[in-house]
Image (cartoon, rainbow, N blue to C red):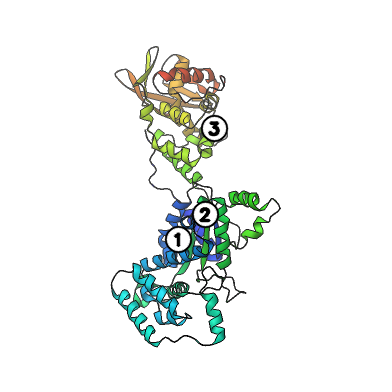
Amino acid sequence: MKIEIKEINLEEKIKDFSQYLATTDRIILSAKFGDGKTYLLNQLRNNEELNKEYKFFTIYPVNYSVAKNEDIFEYIKRDIIVQLDKEGLLDNVDLNAVFDSLFNFEDIKALVAFLLSFIPGGAFYDIVFQKFCEKKKEYKEKKHTGDKYLALFSQIKGSIYENDGYTSLIRNAIDWMKKDHAMNGPEWKKKKAVLIIEDLDRLDPKHLFRILNVLSAHIDDTTTPDVVTNKFGFDNIVLVMDYETTAHIFHHFYGKDACYEGYMSKFLSREPFKYSIQPFIAIQIERELSKKLGVSHIFMTFSKFWMKIHNLSIRDLKKLTMFDTQDRIRSDSFEYKHMKFSTSLPLFHLIIYMVECGMSVDEIVTDLKTKITHMSKGERRIMCQEYMRLSYPLYAIMNNREFTEFSYGTEKYSVTVKSENGIITEVSVSPADTWVSSNLVKIEELDIEETVRWCLSEFSTCINLAALCDTKKT
């Protein structure tokens, strides 16, 4: 038996995040390392509804961690430009407007050299080269002293005032994208631009705050200081990191009295969007186990097993989905006196999963002897059938015999077993209208704790229980 999870349903989280995008320009997507941030982001990028309204651009500052401060923002700009080209947005840039926004011919040469270095030959390549040749002929250096003074700052790498060709190109492309060009095709309907800054929690702490400081210096457009915006014109900026862990690192670097919330307010418009894929995986495993074991209400009955599943780390949950219980089977059957039970019965596979989740003997005993209470008559009837279908070998061993009828309270049930070569391979349970009292097992009156403990020891002859923790011995 193996759990198969083909896809994790994150529809509700995607709806929640889309609300953040609609109302929040600066977002921190907070999740611990390994909590599935990348999976969520991939779901967002591939979501059909979100793609109608947003265009996502992603950069990875971990690639810049060894760069100088003044070079970091240059790498960011170049990564964004490469993605703009991949989306076909550079083809629509007004190069005249971009070139006219630059203060000197050196900026134009640098920008054109960069574009021609990675753009393959084609229509846009020809346009860039043609515009460059035209500008080369008509360009005259600005003579106004103020312009020269401003040009000096605009060319300084890393300066908060920089406005070189790369910045102008990005802003022009994004401005074009944010206007409606549906006449050119449905894919050119206006969209909002979202910049995702990924994997910040993979950075060395000293590099993390260095890069955050560089980002904070450029996150506002210095030409409009009273407007919350950013230099490139993105509608949303999303920082991907673990907000709580970063707080600990911040106080380690700057002291316990330093104001982390004040520092991070530069990047936040509201509370961080907190996320973990763990509960979604746990729910999927719960559903798959219920289906595989044929017990739809399994976690209503086995509460400690439910808690174990929902408290496992993502790594351990992944391990649970990767192993096959058949690999833990030592023999085809378990024999007790004149009875033989096939290890294909769901009880054996349930115990294997319980052991793999790290449950102790005491925890397994508590779950397997659970009494069915606090529910409606209809629910109790279903639960009784499922519980006995699963636990039948335990009660048969306790009673030293097979039985065909049992009761729980005032409800009576019949049991049918199928055998192959004398080995019980299947158990089915159904409500009974009549019964033979001499053969009736009243399960609500039985305490099977000792039987379960004995079975957990003896079952090791047919299934591998080496990982089982006996709390009485530890």
Q: Residue at x 38, y 40 (%)?
A: 4
**Residue 275 visible (yes or no):** yes
Q: Which mark is residue 58?
A: 1
Which corner quadrant holds the N terminus? Answer: top left
List the residue tagged with mark 2: 200
Q: Residue at x 57, y 84 (%)?
A: 146
Which corner quadrant holds the C terminus? Answer: top right
Say which amino acid is labelled 3: Lys
> Looking at the image, is 319 positioned above or below residue 77?
above
- Quadrant hosting residue 85: bottom left
Q: Residue at x 54, y 38 (%)?
A: 311
Which badge, 2 or 1, is on the more N-terminal residue?
1
Q: Please tell me how crowded label 1 is: few (under 14), some (14-19), or many (20+) other residues with Cα within 10 Å.
A: some
What is the C-alpha distance between the residues marked 2 and 1?
Answer: 12 Å
Which badge, 3 or 2, is on the more N-terminal residue?
2
Q: Secondary structure at mark 2?
A: helix
Q: Please tell me how crowded label 2 is: few (under 14), some (14-19), or many (20+) other residues with Cα within 10 Å.
A: many
Q: Position of residue 373 (x, y in %)?
A: 56, 32
Q: Which mark is residue 304?
A: 3
Q: Position of residue 186 (x, y in %)?
A: 36, 71
What is the C-alpha distance between the residues marked 3 and 1?
Answer: 41 Å
